[in-house]
Amino acid sequence: MISRMFAITAWLAAGHAVLVGLFWLLLAIPESNVAMLVASALIAVLMIVLFGWVEGLGLIAWSAQTPARQLPQRAIPAIPAVLLGTALFVVTWYLTEQAGTWWSVRQGETDAWLMLRFGWTNTGRLHVGVGWLLAFVRYGLGITLSVALAASVIEGGFGRVVGAGWIRKGLSPRRLLLTTGLLLAFAWLPWRGVSWRPTWLSPNWQELVFVGLKLGVLYLGANLGWSLVLGTSRQGVFNRTSKTPAVSGNHDSLSPAS
């Protein structure tokens, strides 16, 4: 389990680094003529395909029944499933963004109604609570459902989309709490300290080294958390009592380590 987790984390970190490099290349291309526009479109398509391949391999790699050398090939058919799950998350993001905008526009009216109806003079906590609720729906629920959908399609084909199995998995309280906790621990909390630096640090090469090390640690931590989020799609991955079937006679398989 531990060795597989770190192997998946290393894969995701490398794949996401390539995606970031392609994104910066896309931004650097001057779209001044047709050739540059075509180059930008090709890079955008490459990024989409590569994203689906990287995340698909991360999902499949949690299965101990898949030999390691077969993972790159097995991840190619998983690309559409990953893109479908990503589309679901994009829709969730859009809906929560619209709901947040609607609430912000009517915030004054809501405060006035609450003051008139219930005598509330301090509604700050209410608005903070609504913000956290929308964030939970967007990230906790949205990511859990998206990962569950992608994993179900990878395992059983696109016929699983019309079934309710992936929805039940995505709405599982255990998976929701686990995914939300991982996102808080590996993304939200580290981001709170992204601008922190020791007061005694000199503004010279020492600060440059410190910032590089800090961002590197945060990047690896985020990929570790994401690998665990992908692992929640596999039944029994985090169950210490479950027994994972081993692939006999194949030393290239990602068998769990104690």
Image: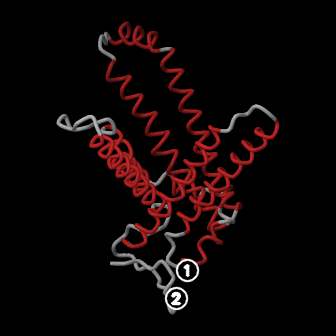
- Which residue was labeled with disc 2? 250
Residue 24, relative to residue 99: is it above or below?
Answer: below
Where does residue 178 sit, x and y in percent of width and height? 38, 54
- Which residue was labeled with disc 1? 67
Asked if disc 2 and disc 1 are in contact, CB closer than 8 Å, the reply is yes
Name which residue type carries label 1. Answer: Pro
Q: Nearer the viewer, residue 237 or 200?
A: 200
Where does residue 257 sit, x and y in percent of width and height? 37, 78
Q: Nearer the viewer, residue 159 or 189?
A: 189
Which residue appears at 51% of the width and 81% of the height?
253
Name which residue type carries label 2. Answer: Asn
Residue 236 placement, left or right of 196: right
Q: Nearer the viewer, residue 207 or 120?
A: 207
Residue 64, relative to residue 118: is it above or below?
Answer: below
Location of residue 26 (image quadrant): top right
> Which quadrant is home to the N terminus?
bottom left
